[in-house]
Amino acid sequence: MAIKAVIFDLDGTINRSVRYYKAYDDYAMSILAEFLKLPKKQVYAKMQALRKTATGFTKRVELLGMPRSIFYDQMTARIPCDNLIDADVKLKVMLEELRKEGYKLALLTNTGLPLVQKIVAALGIPSNMFAVIATSTDTGLKPDDEPYLYVAHQLSVPLQDCLYVGDRYEMEIETAKRLGMTTALIANSFLEDSLRSGYSDHIIDNIYAVPTLLRVINAKRERLVEPNSSVIHQA
């Protein structure tokens, strides 16, 4: 069967603004420092220490005792996405073409829904471009299984007919692949050394390579299911 749905990660995949992430880190430390009533340097040290045991920024925020909903509400109110993220016309056109070709599109991210909507708007992408936007407001956190199963269910597409596109192996690709999704890793991640461990089904240089990759994957799948009398009629 051909790929029917493409599930995109947000941070480092759909949104690749270096300006945004530099500002995000500063806003995040301020929000956590105010909540915990600690100096920013001490909060930063605690977050760095948690990297050894907790995968994902949102998980580390929660381990410090701050509910994710409160954190993302405050981040949404503070961070000026329009000033930090440029509209991406090329990305918008690519997504529109994928929809016209019949693919269901989804976003899957640990970021809270209000901030996701603000980021997507800054990129110049209508929120209805995606059949499903699954966030930490709706489901569990990557790399757990729950969010992947949730988004596939919401799309009504079997796991094996989904392509997952992300930029971090341990944070997202590993789980998607284990659950049976086809995976595409964006190799030039600036959020972490994405190629440091494991492997993805496919590696692409940037998100704009997705349409070409889909054609390659689906052509290969079509060849695999072509009638072969020597196989079909075996006893």
Image (spheres, rainbow, N blue to C red):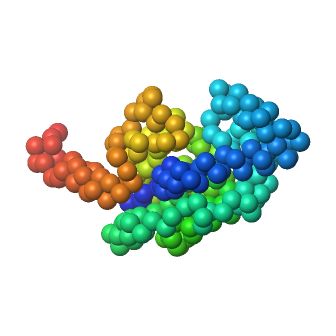
Report the front residue among 83 and 88: 83
Q: Relative to the observer, which residue lies in front, 212 or 21?
A: 21
Task: Report x, y in % for residue 74.
Answer: 77, 57
* Residue occupying image coordinates x 27% and y 56%: 212
Please tell me whether residue 106 is drawn above or below residue 96 in the rendered image.
above
Q: Which residue is drawn at 46% across and 47% down?
A: 166
Residue 234 percent coordinates (x, y): 15, 41
Task: Answer left or right for 73 relative to 187.
Answer: right
Side of 17 where 1 appears, left or right: left
Q: Residue farthest to the left?
A: 230
Q: Is residue 80 above or below residue 36?
A: below
Residue 145: percent from left, percent from top: 58, 42
Is residue 42 visible in this depiction of the protein? yes
Quarter of the picture holding the C terminus? top left
Which residue of the protein is positioned furthest toward the right in this rendering? 37
Q: How many labels does the image show?
A: 0
Residue 180 in sight? no
